[in-house]
Amino acid sequence: MNYHDIITLEPGKRSDKPCIRGMRITVYDILEYLAGGMTEAEILEDFSELTSEDIKACLAFAADREKKLFVVSL
């Protein structure tokens, strides 16, 4: 999934954290809700401005970041 049009980074907004479409909802917020047991339907019900694609974009963004992590041996 191409999340680049959905996940935005704006200096000064939410401490420079990646947000959804310029809103004040961060990728971290969505991941935390999912990890806490909320379903996609529950998130969409609580945040009517979000779409299913927004949630998928958050997951794709997190997966991409995880893929870019690496371990350096000391």
Image (spheres, rainbow, N blue to C red):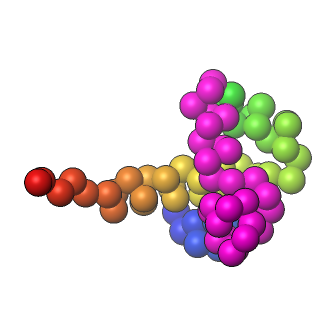
Query: From the image, which quarter does the C terminus lie in?
Result: bottom left
Q: Residue at x 60, y 42 (%)?
A: 31
Q: Name the spot of residue 65 as percent of width and height, x first.
A: 42, 59
Residue 14 seen: yes
Is 37 left or right of 65, judged from the image as shown?
right
In which quarter of the view is residue 34 placed? top right
Q: Residue furthest front?
A: 74
Residue range (magenta):
8-37
Q: Is residue 43 magenta?
A: no
Please tell me how many numbered marks the rendered image carries: 0
Name the one closer to the observer, 68 or 48: 68
Q: Is residue 66 above or below residue 9?
A: above
Q: Looking at this view, is 70 or 11 the one in front?
A: 11
In this picture, residue 3 sits left or right of residue 13: left
Residue at (72, 60) in percent of width and height: 14
Left or right of 69 in this view: 48: right
Residue 56 appears in the figure:
no
Q: Position of residue 38 (x, y in %)?
A: 68, 28
Question: Where residue 63 sits: x, y (%)?
Answer: 43, 53
Q: Residue at image x 58%, y 66%?
A: 3
